[in-house]
Image (cartoon, helix red, strand yellow):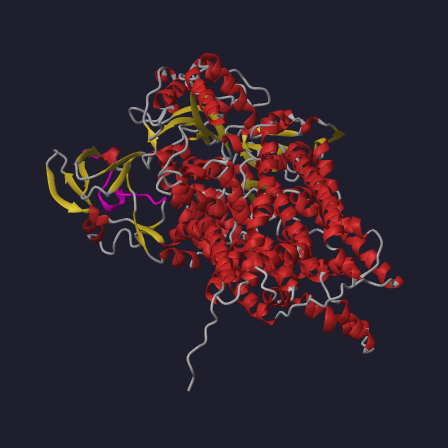
Amino acid sequence: MRGPLVKPKLGRDDWAQRSFMLVIGLYLIVALALPLYVMLSKAFTIYHFDLRQYEVQVSDESGNFGETLTLSSHNMRPSPSVVEDLSTNTNGRLGIAQFFPDFSFRSPVNYRFRGVTPSAVYLIGSERNSGPDWVELDSNTFRRVVLRPVSERGLTNFKTYFSTPALFQSVQNSLLIAVIVTVITVSLAFWFAYALARSKMHLKGVFRMVAMMPILVPSLLPGIALLYLFSPRQGMLKALMFGHDINGPIGIVIGSVFFTFPHAMIIISTALSISDARLFEASESLKASRWRTFWTVTIPGARYGLFSAAFVVFNLVITDFGLPKVIGGNFNMLAVDIYKQVIGQQNFEMGAVVSIVLLVPALLAFGIDRRMQKKQVALLTSRSVVFEPKPNKPMDWFFFGYASFVAIFIVGIIAVCQFAALIKQWPYNLSLSLKNYDFSRMDGGGWGSYTNSLLLAILTAIIGTVVVFLGAYMVEKTKGFEKGRAIFQGLAMLPMAIPGMVLGIAYIFYFNNPSNPLNFIYGTMIILVVSTVTHFYTVSHLTAVTALKQMDTEFESVSQSLKQPFYKLFWRVTVPVSLPAILNISIYLFVNAMTTVSAVVFLYSTDTALASVAVLNMNDAGDIAPAAAMGMMIFYTNAGARILHALLSKGILARSNAWRKSG
Amino acid sequence: MKRIALASVLALGVAAQAMAVDLTVYTAVEAEDLTRYAEAFNEDHPDITINWVRDSTGVITAKLLAERNNPQADVIWGLAATSLLLMKAEDMLEPYAPAGVEYLDPKFVDSSTPPAWTGMDAWVAAICYNTVEGEANGVPAPTSWADLTDPVYAGHIIMPNPNSSGTGFLDVSSWLQIFGEDGGWEFMDGLHANISRYTHSGSAPCKLAAAGETTVGVSFAFRGAKSKAAGAPIEIIVPTEGVGWDMEATAIVAGTANLEAAQTLVDWTVTRKANELYNQGYAVVAYPGVAQPVEYFPEGLVDAMIDNDFEFAANNRGAILAEWASRYDGKSDPK
C-alpha cells in the first residue's frame, strides 16, 4: 500500500521562478509555436477539382442548347473517366475542353457554363469567374476555360511527397550529408577545443579568434570562395579535386564543415572549459595513463557538450539551403526542395510537407538529448578546483601543428573571399580595383542597410541574451514542474530544426494577420529582432544550459538554507560563474544577426533593408565581386565586435572570476 | 511637457505634409535602376514618396501571395507578368486602365478590360556563349536551339531548373510552343543528355559562361549584356527558331488604401518618359518607337521573340513542371 504522495509546499521563490519561466515560455509560444503551427498546418491543406460544382449546356450547330449536365457526369460518360485523379495542388488548373470528345475550337457549337455554388471558381483565360450566373462562350473561348481547385484537410500531400522520387530522394541525400559533416566537424572541433583548453600551445588567443571566423561571414561566402578555388574549369586549385566536381556533395560537405565548425567549437569549448582539476589529480595519483584519463575523465565530462554539438551541426546542415543552392549542383537536399517549392513554385503546402519531414530527424535527436541529460552529472561542484594545463612540449607542439592546419583552412577561405572582392572580372581580368566597395549602387539602400544590420545585431544580442539566459536558468534550476520544463525544453530545441525560410514565411502568415494583436510589429525592426532571436535560440540555449548544468545544485541548497531569495544567488553566483557563457551567447547572437538571410529575407521592409540580404541579392544578380565586398564588410564588422567583446570580457572576467584562479 | 512639444511637432509635420503620400512599391527590378525610376517619377510628382521593397522575382512573388489576406504593397512596379497572372487569377490585382495605355503595344497590356496589369519591358531568353572556352574545348558557337542537342555540346551546357527559376520555366514553355508539345519534350530529352548542371537561378548560367565555368549558358539577354559590358569574353546568341520572353509589368494591389496615388504612379509608368528609362537597360519596351538599340544587346532580338502565349504558360505551368521534374529532376543525380 502506498501512502498519499507528499507534495512539497511551493515557496515564494518557486512561484517567482515559475512565473518567469511562463513569461519566457509565452515568448516561445508566440514567436515560435503559433507561427509554425499556422505554417505547418498547411501541409494538411489539400486541393482537388470538384467537377460536381460546374454545369454545362452544349448547343447544336444551329444554337439550340441541350440538357444541363455537371462536368462530373461528362467526366464519367466516356468510360474510363477522362481525368481519373482529380487531386492537385494550390496552383492546379484543369482545362475542361478535354471532357468533350467532339470538341473542336473551330466548331460553331456554343457552350453555357456556370459554377453551381459561389465557391466554384474558374478562369476564362486569366480572368477569374465564379458563381451561378450562366456564361455563354463560343468554342474558341470555351477551350480557354480552366477550373480552380477547392481545398480541404487531408493527408494526400504526404502521399504525393513519398511517391515522387525526385522529392523523396532528398531525404536520403540530406541524411547522408548531415551525418558525414557532423562526424567531420565534431571531431575537428573537439580536438581544436581540446588543444585550447588542455594544452599549453602557443598563440591560443589567435587560434581562438581564427576558429570563430567562419561564423562572422554570410554563409554564401564560403560557397563563392570554394568555387573560386576548386571549380572544375577555372579554379585556382582545381588539380586538388582530381577530376571531381566541387558542385555537388563534395562542395556541400567542405562548405558545411567550414560554416558549422565555430558552432561546434563554441559548445565543446564551454563543456571543456569548466572542469574540475581534482579529477585529473586523482587520475594522475592513481597512475592512470593519459589515454585512460582522457577516456574516463575528459570524455565523460564533455559528453553532453559533444552530443549538443553533434545535434547542432546535424541540424544546421540539414536545414541550410544557401550553400547547396550555390554549390550543390544537381544534388537535391530537403532544404533546397523547400526553396524550389516555396520560391520557385509558390507551393506553400508542399513546402510545409518537406518542413515536417525535416523535423523528424530533429525530433529523434531531441529524444536522445533528453536521455543524455538525465545522465549528465554536475561537474563543477562548490568544491571544484579549476583545471590548469601543465606544459608538455611534444604534445603542445603537436596541437600547435593541428590547430595551424585548421586555421590555414579557415583563413584561406576568407582570404579568397577578400581576393574575390577586389578583382575586376574573374578569371579574365585579374587587375585589382576598389570599385566593388562603392555601395551607393548597392541593393537595398546602400549604407542604410549596413546601419540597419548593425542595429538589428545589437538589439538581438541584448534582448536575446536576456531572454535566452533567463529561460535556460529557469528551466534548469526550477524544482518540480516537470511537464512545464519538458515543454519549454522542447520548444527551445525546435528552432534548430526549422529552416529560416520556413520561419520567415510562417511569420508572414501569423503576424500579417489583421486580427493578430501583434500585427503592428509586421514590417518593423521588432519583427526582425524577434525572428532572429528565435531562429538562433537553440544554440544560445544549449550554451547556457551546458554552463548551468556544470554548476552543482549545492549552490542552491546552501543559498536556500541561508534563506536567500533565488535572485540574489542568481546575481551573485550564477551570473558571474556563467559569465563566459553569457558573453558567448551575446556575441553569437550578434554575429548571426549580421549574417542571417533566410528568415529575414521575407520580413524586411523599406526602412529595414539588411546588408546580409544585399549580399544574397547581389550574388543572385551576378555581381559576385560587390557581394563578396559587402560580405567582407560584414566580416570586418563582426571581427571588430569580437575583438571589442574579447577585451570587454577579459576585463569583466578578471574582476568577477578571480575565484577561478584562487583555488 | 516633452510629450506636448513632441505632439505639436508631429501635428505641424502632418499639416505641412497633408498632401504627401507614401506608396509601398514591391519590385524585382535591378536595384541600381530603382533610384533612377523614383527620381524621374518625383520630378513630375514630388508629393508621392516611393518606398521600395526589392527582392528576387521568386521571393517577391511568394511574399505577395503569403500576404494576400492583408496586403502590404500598394503597387507592384517591375515584376514578371507570369507572376502577375498568378495574382490576377486570385483577384489580388485592382484592374485599372492607366491614362495613355492605348499608346502601348497591345501585347504588353493585359487582355482584360480594364487591364489588370501593364507591361514595361521584355525580358528575352538568349544563349551566352564563351568564345575563349569554346575555342579551348573545340565547341562551336550554336546558332539554333536544335544545335544544342548535338553530342559535341555534351557536358558544356548549363541551364536554369524550371522548378526553381522563372527563367528556366520561360525557356521550357517557349520550347513547347516552338516545337509543339511532343517535339518540345523530344528536344529537351536531347538537351538533357548534354546538360552538365541545372542551376537554381536564371542568371547563373550566363554568369557561369562569363566566368568560363561552362561554354554555353541558357539564360537571358539582359544578363548577357551586363556580363559583356563587364568585359567577359561572351557572345549573346539569339537562336534561329525564336526565343521565349516574359515582361516586367506594373499593377495596383487590390485593397490599397492609397488608390488615387497608386493610379497616379501607374499612369506615369506607361508614359513615354518612363519607357525611355526602361530602355536604358532593356532593348524591348512597351511603348512603340521608343526603343533605341542598347549596347551589347544582340541584333535581331525583337524579331526573334516568339508570339508568347502567356495564358498557355500560366494555365499549364503545374503540369509542365511536374512532367519536367519526373523526366529530368528525379534522375538528375543518379550516382
Q: Quadrant of the C terminus of chain A?
A: bottom right
Please tell me whether residue A106 belongs to the stretch shown in magenta.
Answer: yes
Q: Position of residue A272 (x, y in %)?
A: 71, 62
| Residue A119 falls left or right of residue A22 | left
Residue sitting nearer the eye, A637 or B36: A637
Question: Is the residue A225 above or below the residue A46 in the image?
Answer: above
Residue sitting nearer the eye, A179 or A50: A179
Q: Position of residue B66 (x, y in %)?
A: 41, 41
Q: Which residue is rendered at x = 45% and y = 47% of the image?
A: A341
| Residue A6 falls left or right of residue A425 | left
Q: Is residue B151 visible?
A: no
Residue sitting nearer the eye, B129 or A54: A54
Q: Is residue B162 visible?
A: yes
Q: Which residue is rendered at x = 32% and y = 23% of the image?
A: B96
Q: Position of residue B259 (x, y in %)?
A: 35, 24
Residue sitting nearer the eye, A139 or B288: B288
Q: Quadrant of the N terminus of chain A?
A: bottom left
The part of the chain drawn in magenta is: A91-109
